[in-house]
Amino acid sequence: MPSAKNITAASDLIFRSRPLVIGHRGFCAIAPENTLPSFALAMKAGADLIELDYRHSKDGVPMVIHDATLDRTTNARKLWKRKHIKVANKTATEIQMLDSGNWFDAKFAGAKIPRLTEALDFICGNGAVALIERKSGDAKTLAKLLREQNWICPTVVISFDWKFLRELHELEPDLILGALGPPARLSNGKKPTHLRRGLSARLNDIAKTGASVVVWNRHISKRAIRLAHQRKLKIWIYTISHPPITRRLLNCGVDGIITNDAGLFADKERISRL
């Protein structure tokens, strides 16, 4: 558990005037995604927030991994002689038997899939803010974990499932939330059906989630950003690693860039001048 003196409050960070740099799955351009080495390199590069994904294991433990299956980023196929092994079909102990680094580069061999508790202890304990993307799992389990480990303050939680965000906000109203879009499910649990999937058409529903941040793709208009800002919402864009696109988005008024290359924009003075 991080000491109070090491904690960086997410609420203080996200309302700074300059654009924020957010390391996507750590520093996944140069290290295996969602591993402790990737998080360490992103922090060293100066990223403002360290983004990670989590899913629940068979025994209900939040594990830091993006995909629903273990094939792409581990040696599960080689170890268990099967394809398409789901995270949800293996226990946390079984999952941590896997090598999650060698697929990327032999120098990362031995890296493990962290439990969410391990990842947050590593990130928040080193004074950084974690951006947690929920891929699967219930709101009650995450709220309990963050509350018990004193991680409400140095974390932001985002999800494409706006019903999950609404439930989490009801459980932990002080937790900073981000609505990922376009959404998979709205705050009422229904899937978006009409053709207008743009941000401007979703602002009323975002308000119901309790989110103070909108995390959107690059297909966003200056008008939508202005309307969101009028509602006191911050706008972060995923996943950008090219300066010309970054420059355009910053000129449109976005408040943060999620990037695979945390070092590319980690010079805060330079990103402010782009």
Image: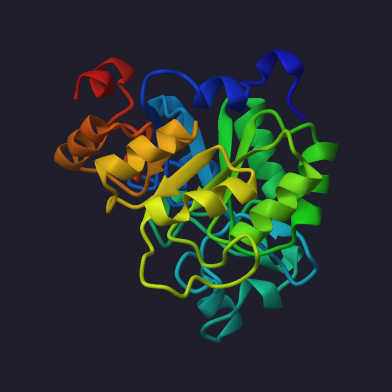
- Single out the residue that lies furthest toward the bottom: 82
Is residue 149 or residue 95 the one in the foreground?
149
Residue at image x 60%, y 72%? 190
Residue at image x 69%, y 78%? 89
Is residue 132 or residue 44 the one in the foreground?
132
Residue at image x 29%, y 49%? 220
Q: Position of residue 87 (x, y in %)?
A: 63, 71
Quadrant in the picture for residue 119: top right
Q: Position of residue 55 (x, y in %)?
A: 64, 62
Is residue 102 or residue 227 the one in the foreground?
227
Q: Is residue 127 visible?
A: no
Query: Where's the C terminus, which quadrant?
Result: top left
> In the shown orientation, is residue 147 left or right of residue 57?
right
Query: Where's the N terminus, which quadrant?
Result: top right
Q: Is residue 160 visible?
A: yes
Q: Position of residue 244 (x, y in %)?
A: 14, 39
Q: How many marks?
A: 0
Is residue 255 or residue 136 the one in the foreground?
255
Quadrant in the picture for residue 140: bottom right
Q: Work out whether 166 lies above or below 256.
A: below
> In the shown orientation, is residue 88 left or right of residue 83?
right
Q: Work out whether 197 lies above or below 109.
A: below
Q: How is the image coloured?
A: rainbow
Q: Position of residue 181 (x, y in %)?
A: 45, 56
> In the shown orientation, is residue 53 left or right of residue 20?
right
